[in-house]
Each structure stands twice: as C-alpha cells, then as structure tokens.
Image (tube, grey):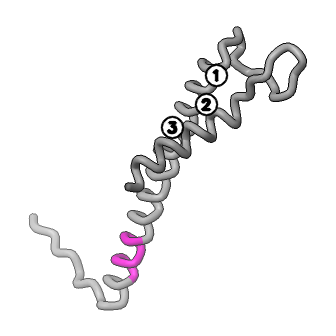
Amino acid sequence: MVMKTPPISADVAARMAAENVRQFSGDAKAKESQQDTIVRMWCIEQAAAVCGTELGIMWHGSDQHKCAVVPIAEEILMFITAKNNE
C-alpha cells in the first residue's frame, strides 16, 4: 500500500522554512556560547594554576598573597582572543 502525502501550500512551506532557519540559528548560537564558556573556563584554570595556592584562588590585595585569578584569567583571554582575531 502506498500512502501519498497531501501537497503543502506555499504558506506552510514558507513557515516551515522559517522555522528551520530559526532552529538552525538558535543551535549555532548555543554551540558558540558553549565554546565561549569552555575557553573562559580554561582561562580560569590556567590563572588558578599560576596563583600556585592549594585552592588557586586568592583575592588581590590580601596581606598574605598578591594574586588574583580573575585579572590573570582576563589577561589570558584577551591574549588568546587577540591572536584568533588577527
């Protein structure tokens, strides 16, 4: 037995195409956001390693340590993104 599908109107086809584009765009943005988060987390891990503490986190201006993860991570991120943008 062969089943035939009814023809799709131009309006329905246009709506389906628009939905496909919207879905693809959303998926691409989600993937880009995920990649950005992975890069930022890597920068934080590297900055924590540079600080050399057991926890890797010390606030800038502390009496015992003058190391801050966030400024170092920002510098790493700026360095690697500047290389990628050239």
The amino acid on which the numbered mark 2 sits, given as a three-letter code, is: Ile
In the rendered structure, find residue 70 and report the number of the disc placed on it: none
The residue indicated by pointer 1 is 48
Q: Are marks 2 and 1 in contact (CB under 8 Å)?
A: yes
Q: CA distance from mark 1 to mark 3?
A: 15 Å
Q: Nearer the viewer, mark 1 or mark 3?
A: 1
Q: Which mark is residue 38?
A: 3
Q: Quadrant of residue 10?
A: bottom left
Q: Answer left or right for 49 relative to 8.
A: right
| Magenta stretch, residue numbers | 15-21
Q: Nearer the viewer, residue 17 or 75?
A: 75
Q: Position of residue 39 (x, y in %)?
A: 50, 39
| Label 3 crowd (10 A; few <14 / some 14-19 / many >=20) | few
Q: Position of residue 47 (x, y in %)?
A: 61, 26
Q: Three-letter amino acid code at disc 3?
A: Ile
Instruction: Point out which mark residue 44 bears.
Output: 2
Q: Residue furthest bottom?
A: 10
Q: Quadrant of residue 74?
A: top right
